Each structure stands twice: as C-alpha cells, then as structure tokens.
Amino acid sequence: MPLSRARKLEYMQRLTGFFQEFNKILVVNVDNVGSKQIQTVRAALRGKAELIFGKNTLMRKAIKDILEEQPEHPSEKLLPLLVGNMGFVFTNEDVGAIREEIAKNVVPAPAKAGSYAPSDVYAPAGPTGQGPDKTSFFQALNIATQIKRGMIEIVNPVQIIFEGEKVTNGAAELLKMLNIEPFEFGIGMTHVYDNGELFSVKVLDITDDVLQNRLLQAASTMASICLEIGFPTLASLPHSISNAFQKIASIALEVDYSFPKLEEIKSGAAAAAASAASAAPAGGDAPAEEEEKEEEKSVDMGGGNLFGDDDDDDY
C-alpha cells in the first residue's frame, strides 16, 4: 500500500532528524530477513540505536534535502549505497558493540533450489535414515554410500553446495532429507559511516592487537632490508649497534683489552656461571677457569633481539 503524502513527509522528517541527532551509521542489508526478525533486533538495540528502513527513493530525497541546505554535508557519500533492500542503523554508541548485537540475531534457513549459496555446505558422513531404495538418488549426486543395518550411510563427507553458486535441486532435496538447515540469515552489515567518514564494515575486525602485530612485522621487514643494503634507519640502528659492539667485544677479549661495559658483562656472566655451578650436582663440574672462559665466549654482548635474529654483517 503506497504511503500517503503526510506519512512520506513524516518519514523524511524523522530520517533527517536522525542525521542531526546521530553521528554514526551502520549501513545494513535485509535480504531474506522477515519483519519479526527486524523487530527482535530493534528491541535488542532499544536505547542504543535506531533502525530505519524504507523506500530508497525517499531516503535519497531526504539526503538530497540535507545537501540543499548544507552542500558540504558528508551524507552525500551514502547515496551510491541506496540500492536493494537496505537500511540505516543510527547510533552514538560504539559501532563495534552495535554490530555484535545485530550479528547475534540470526535464524537458521534451509537451502532453496535456485538460490545463491552464502557459504559452502557439506553432507556429513554417517547414517542418513534412508532405506536402500534411495541408493540411486545418492548415486546421481556422486556420493559414495554403503548399506548398514538396512540403512544408507554416507562414507565420507562430501561438498554438495559451493559458495556463490546456485543451489541445485538435488542438493536442496538431500539437505531436506537429512534435516539440515545449512544457512543462517540475519541483517547484513556492509558499511560504516562515522562522523562523515565512510568505510567497509570489515575495518571493525581490525583490533589493536592486529594493528600492533602488523606494525611489528613491518618494522622487522624494514630492519632486515636496511641491514641488507647498509642503510641506517631507526628500525635497523639497534641491530647495527649490537652487531658492532659484539665485534668490538670479541676483539677486546682476543687481545686481552678491557673497558667498563665489557667488564660489566663479564661480571654478570661470571655471577651467572657461579650460580649455575652451585645449583649443579657435585662431581660433574668443569674446571672453573675453563667454564669462565667458555662463558665469556658464549655471552650475548648486548643490543637485544628487537625485531628478529641479528645480522652478522658490519654496517
């Protein structure tokens, strides 16, 4: 039933008001989502976010009205996304938390012949509950079976549906026969609009830990390259200093020359050796002089392994 002019005006005023009240939006898709499921999500987000759906033409008109009054308003970025069954979730809360709340509300769904599969589906190995008269059906699907206790069993798991491809009649019938509902349908989230910036919802998967790990990996790669080409940077400098110090310390030990830092390291090594010797069982100790000499050779001469194994080249 078409909306009356008064209701259209009310809808547009409400949508325009949301753009003024909230600064964050989740752009969502509601394909295969029923009104009851939407109401469940709306109730879960009450007090945290506002969901609004409607005709794309009305949404475009509301955004264009905003742009007429404020030509530089960033809501213009949303216009290309107004395609298909979509809507907006307005909020001032943490977008990640809102996303998690929406993702909780999914319902199982059977595989329908002719529809595009959102994910791969496998028929599990084991009993099917079907009698030997259905053997030809499984053979037509190229599924290896055996008869046990008068029932058909699938020998090995077999993929019968491929992500992005149409579900065949045979696959849909088999899953129905096995009482399997392989898919889940819920409100899909595609983009985030945050204070005028528009980006993919996948960006929300990038946590602080992920960023830290990637930064460390990049720094390690940069340090390795700089060490290899002999170009000093903040990433490679600690390694270069460590390598140079180890070479200097090795030469000093060889010519029986000492300096304060080397003496400090030797004292620490000697203390560690004495501690190890006191903790070791009697009878198997090496002579103290040989042990101390061995310890001096094996001690790490400082620097520290900041990003990975130190390179032995001198830069």
Image: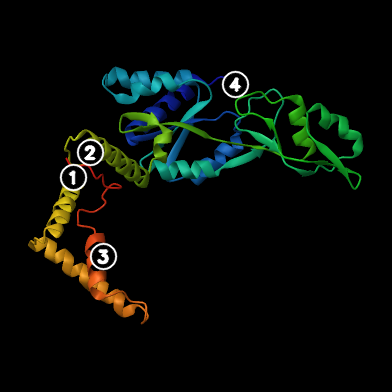
Residue at left offset 88%, top offset 34% = 134
Gap in angstroms between the C-alphas marked 2 and 3? 29 Å
- Mark 4, other Cα within 10 Å: few <14 / some 14–19 / many ≥20: few
Question: What kind of residue is marked 4?
Answer: Met
Task: Tell me if label 2 and label 3 are in contact, CB under 8 Å.
Answer: no
Gap in angstroms between the C-alphas marked 4 and 2? 71 Å
Gap in angstroms between the C-alphas marked 1 and 2? 7 Å
Question: What kind of residue is marked 2?
Answer: Leu
Q: Is residue 147 left or right of residue 154?
A: right
The residue carrying mark 1 is 240
Gap in angstroms between the C-alphas marked 4 and 1? 75 Å
Residue 17 in sight from this viewpoint: no
Please determine whether, in this image, residue 206 is positioned above or below residue 190: below
Question: What kind of residue is marked 3?
Answer: Glu
Instruction: Look at the numbered disc 4 and give the secondary structure of its residue.
Output: loop
- Mark 2, other Cα within 10 Å: few <14 / some 14–19 / many ≥20: many
- In the figure, residue 64 lies in which quadrant? top left
Question: What kind of residue is marked 1?
Answer: Ser
In front: mark 4 or mark 2?
Answer: 2
Gap in angstroms between the C-alphas marked 3 and 4? 90 Å
Gap in angstroms between the C-alphas marked 3 and 1? 25 Å
The residue carrying mark 2 is 227
Residue at left offset 51%, top offset 46% = 44
In front: mark 4 or mark 1?
Answer: 1
